[in-house]
Amino acid sequence: MSVFREIIDRLRERHPDVAGIGVGAAGMVDWPTGRIRWAPNNSYRELPLRELLEQETGLPTVVENDANAAAIAEATFGRGRGYTNLVTLTVGTGIGGGIVLNGRLFRGTTGLGAEVGHIIVDPTDGAMCGCGAVGCLEAMASGIALARTGREAAAADPTGMLATLAGGPDNVRGETVFEAVQRGDPTACQLFDRLGSWLGVGIASLVNILEPQIVIVAGGIAGSVGEVLLTPTRAAFTRFAFASTRRALPPIVPADLGADAGLIGATILALSDRASSTSAA
């Protein structure tokens, strides 16, 4: 909490009229209590973050899942403007999702809905996910998946570009694969094709169920590689979407707001909460 407090104190020194705090946090976040139950890719466990921040600062606080926050931001100021039904996927270390239906964020019963990264896409031959399941979309199409498949490819070809760029197969990361793609390495291109194909499978399932008007892809990987990822994603999506030749499919587009989407969304939610509290008073 000391890091949070330091950041907030510095901000309040510059802006004494700060009215509230908005946080976009990775993991399973209860709504509206702001308790982070668990997160497969970090150490949060039953952390009552909203309560702690309000106690430490005296400011009203909103804590939301980071992908939900990104979806709100894109729906309000980004590629989702003008749409009432949309899906946002954040593709980075893991995969998160935010769903807006009829103009409102869908959270499920307690805020734990829209965990799209844990749709099961390959339960038979898929990789183990950090959540403990096999074949989750996150295990097949995230930065973690890219690094894993990159290391496997480098181990199979220890004199190839991936291993050379990384200084050995064990050092390959997602950034290594992207650099190799930029240099035209066919192995790296195949890895991105595979990653995008799995992402397209997951998006097809979401569209089959929700029929959104648009699908927005955000997050670190999507922002870095753009069409390298989205081209195979769209191809697989078209292949697996229900009745793809009988209807218009929603476009799959890159996000507008980049890495700031979660911050912007958390701010929107904090201001909305503040406005609601003021109106109620």
Image (tube, rainbow, N blue to C red):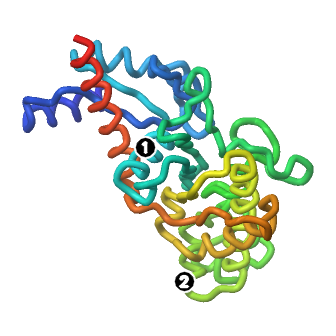
Instruction: Tell me the number on the disc at residue 182.
Output: 2
Q: Residue 189 at x, y = what percent?
A: 67, 79
Q: Residue 264 at x, y = what percent?
A: 33, 46
Looking at this view, is 142 or 19 the one in front?
A: 19
Distance, label 1 to label 2, CA atoms, is: 32 Å
Left or right? Give the position of 236 relative to 219.
Answer: right
In contact (CB < 8 Å): disc 1 and disc 2: no
Amino acid found under the numbered disc labelled 2:
Gln
Q: Residue furthest right?
A: 124
> Residue at coordinates 9% horizontally, 29% vertically from top-left?
17
Residue 118 location, quadrant: top right
Looking at this view, is 144 or 212 the one in front?
A: 212
Looking at this view, is 192 or 175 the one in front?
A: 192
Task: Give SS at disc 1.
Answer: helix
| Rendered view: 239 above or below 275 | below
Left or right? Give the position of 41 relative to 75.
Answer: right
Q: Is residue 151 at least partly visible in the picture?
A: no
Q: Residue 126 at x, y = what percent?
A: 84, 52
Instruction: Tell me the number on the disc at residue 72.
Output: 1
| Rendered view: 239 above or below 94 | below
> Residue at coordinates 70% horizontally, 49% vertically from top-left?
206
Query: Could you tell which of marks 1 and 2 lies nearer the N-terminus?
Result: 1
Quarter of the image with the N terminus in it: top left
Amino acid found under the numbered disc labelled 1:
Ile
Quarter of the image with the C terminus in it: top left
Instruction: Give the class, few, some or many, for how many residues have Cα within 10 Å of label 2's Cα (few <14, many ≥20).
Output: few
Q: Is residue 42 at least partly visible in the picture?
A: yes
